[in-house]
Amino acid sequence: MQIDHDSILTLELPYREQLQLHRTVYHGGDGPKVAVVAGIHGDELEGLYVCHRLAAWLEELALKRPAALLGRVELYPALNPLGIDTLQRFVPVFDTDLNRNFPGHREGLLPQRITDAVMRALAGAVLVLDIHASNVFLREIPQVRINQASAATLVPLAREMNIDVIWLHGAITVLEATIAHSLNSRGIPCLVVEMGVGMRITPAFTDQLMTGILRVWRSLGVLAPDLTLADLTHQPLLADDSNVHYLNAETSGLFLPEVEHWTSVQRGQRLGRIVSPHEGAVLSEVRSPVDGILFTLREYPVVYEGSLMARIMEVSATVPPEPAQ
Amino acid sequence: MNPPALLRMTAPLREDFEIAYHDIGSADSAATLALVAGIHGDELNGVFVLSRLAHFLGGVAADQQPGHRLCARVIVVPAVNILGVNTRNRRWPFDATDINRMFPGYNAGETTQRIAHAVMELTRQAHYRIDIHSSNLDFEELPQVRLYEPNDAERGSARLFGLSAVIERPMNAVFTSTIGHAWRSSGGQNFVLQAGQAGVLQPAHCDRLFHALVAFLSRTGVLTGVELSDPDEEGHYFGLGHTFPLISEHAGLFVSRLAVGRWLQAGDLIGQVYDGFNGELRHEVKAPMAGLLSGIRRQPLLFEGDLIARIQTRQPVAEGVDTYLHSQGQ
C-alpha cells in the first residue's frame, strides 16, 4: 500500500498566501476507487474527524496487512479549507455556499474552481461519501439523505452504512447545484451523510459510521473480502416527505427540550417549552403531533418564530429506536 | 397613522418587530405595481430610493403635487430584511440565511420562509413587480434592468425605465429560489433592477434609479402629469450571451479608475494588479473585447478566480461562460 498526500488545486490569495485543496490517497491494488469528502461547510466538523479515523485505520492496515487494500481510497477532509480555518460556513469573502456551486467551472470564480477540481478528482469513483454535520442549531442522528431520483441505486448502499435513518426527499431544483446531485447525475454514486451538530464532534457517531463505511468498502471490493470487520449495530428506518413532521417555534424565546434526542415520543407528549428571560410564564409548550421518533433536536436554545426545534418521524409505536449514543 | 405591515413577529429578547410597507393610492382595487428593496440588508441604494419614491407618491396621492395624479394603487416595501438593515447584514442575521434564496416561502416554515411568504402574499396581486438590488460589497453595477427568461411583454416594458442597459441573464438552479423567479408563477411582468454597490449609498446611482422608476410609472400610466427633468439615457438591449465576465487569473491588489457605464474598446486598460507585499505591478487588466462596462470590482483585495468586471458585448460571447456566476450580487 502506498500513501500519498497531495493537493488537487492551488489558487493565489490576495496577499502572499495560497489556498490548496489537500487530499490523502491510499493506493492498493487495481480494485475500485472510493472517496470521502467533508468540510464543504466550514462549521461542520464531524466529517473531518471521520477522515482522521479512517486515515488511522488505513495506516494501521498498511502496517498489518497492506495487501488487504484491493482498491484506492481518497480522503478529502476539507473542501472549504478557508472556511474551516476561519470558522465560516460559507466560502469566506465570496459569501457563497460551496454546496450550491457544483459542478463548477475551471475558469469560473474561486468557489466554482474548487468544485470543478473536486468533480474532476472524483471521476471514476464507485462511491463517494459526502459527510455533513447539520449546522450549529440542530443535532441530527446519523442518517443518509437521498434524492428520490437516485433511490434505486443508493438505498441498498445506505442500508449497509450502519446509520439510523434513510431520508428520501423529493427533487428540489436548487439542490441540483450540490455535490451529491452533480455526482449522481454523472453516474458516480454519492451518499450524503448528516450527523451530529455544527462546530462539534460526536465520537460515538463516528464509531458507528466507521463500521458501515468499512463494510460497504469491503462489499464493493475495495477491501479484501476476508477482512474481519465489526458487525452492523444499527438498521436504518426509512423517512420520506410523508412521515416526517416539522416542529417550528410558534413564538420567539428560549427553547428548553424535555426529551432526549433519538427517542420515541407519543402524540400530544410535551417535548419542551419556549420561555422568556423577561418573565416567569411559559410562552409556548411544544408537543408532538404524532407517535414517532425524534430524530432532529434543536441544540441552540434561542428561537425566532419559525425556528425549527425538532423533526419527528411518524412510525408504528411498536418500532423502538436504537439506543441513543 | 402607522403604516401597514406585511408581517409582525416576536423576537427572542427585543420588542416585537414588523415589516412595514407603503400602500399608496386608491384601496378600491388591487395594486398595479409592487416595488421591493432591501431583501439584502446591506443594499442601501434601493432602500433609499424606495423610501423617497414612497414620499413622493404619498404627496401625489395627497394632492400635494399640483398637476400630478396617481392613477393606480402602488405597494412599496423599502426594506424586507429590516434586522439586516439595522445590523448592516446582507443576510437574515440570526441564522445567516439569504432571504432571496427562500422564495416562494412557507407560512408555517422557518422564519425567513415566513418572511418570503408574506412578501409574496402582498405583492402577488400586482401586475408589475420590481425587485431592486445593489450587487454586493465588492462590486459596483451600472443601474440596469435584469431579465431572467423574460416574456415578450417584459422585454418590451424593460425599455420603459429609460436606463442605459437592459440585460438578459441565464436562469440557473440557485436562482429558482429568488423572489424574481417566484413572481413568475403569478403572471404579470417582473423586473430586477441592479444599481451600484452594497454597503454604501451612491447619490448619482440613486438619482438614475429614481428617474427610472418615475419614468416607468409615467409610461405605464400609473402616474400622470409628470415631466421628467432629465432625458433618458441611450438604451441598449443585451440579450442572452452578450455578457462577458472578466475573471482574474492573478491575485493581489486591484486598482482601477474606471467608472461604470463607459464603452470600452478591445485592449483598453481596465486596471492593474499589484503585489501587496513588494509593490510590483503583476498584471495589467485589459478589456478582451469591446463593450459596455456594466460592472466593476471596487474591492481591491483580489483572489485568483475573482470577478473583475462585466462587459456587455454587441456580439455574443462564448456560450455558457456566464451561467456559472450565479452567486454574484443577487
Image (tube, coloured by chain):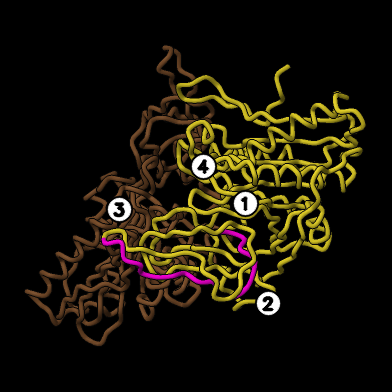
Q: Which residue is mark 4?
A: B199
Label 4 marks a residue whose chain is: B
In the picture, the disc for residue B315 is 2
Residue name at image x 30 percent, y 82 percent? A32
Q: Main secondary structure of the magenta part?
A: strand
Q: Identity of the amino acid at label 2?
A: Gln
Q: Identity of the amino acid at label 1?
A: Thr
Mark 1 vs mark 2: give the one in front.
Answer: 2
Label 1 marks a residue whose chain is: B
Depicted A195 relative to depicted B33: above or below: below
Q: Nearer the viewer, residue B76 or A202?
A: B76
Q: Where are the magenta residues, as a range?
A: B278-295
Tell me residue B329's x, y (percent). Answer: 55, 53
Q: Identity of the amino acid at label 3?
A: Ile
Mark-to-mark CA distance, 1 and 2? 29 Å
Q: Secondary structure at mark 4?
A: loop
Residue A261 falls left or right of residue B224:
left
Q: Secondary structure at mark 3?
A: helix
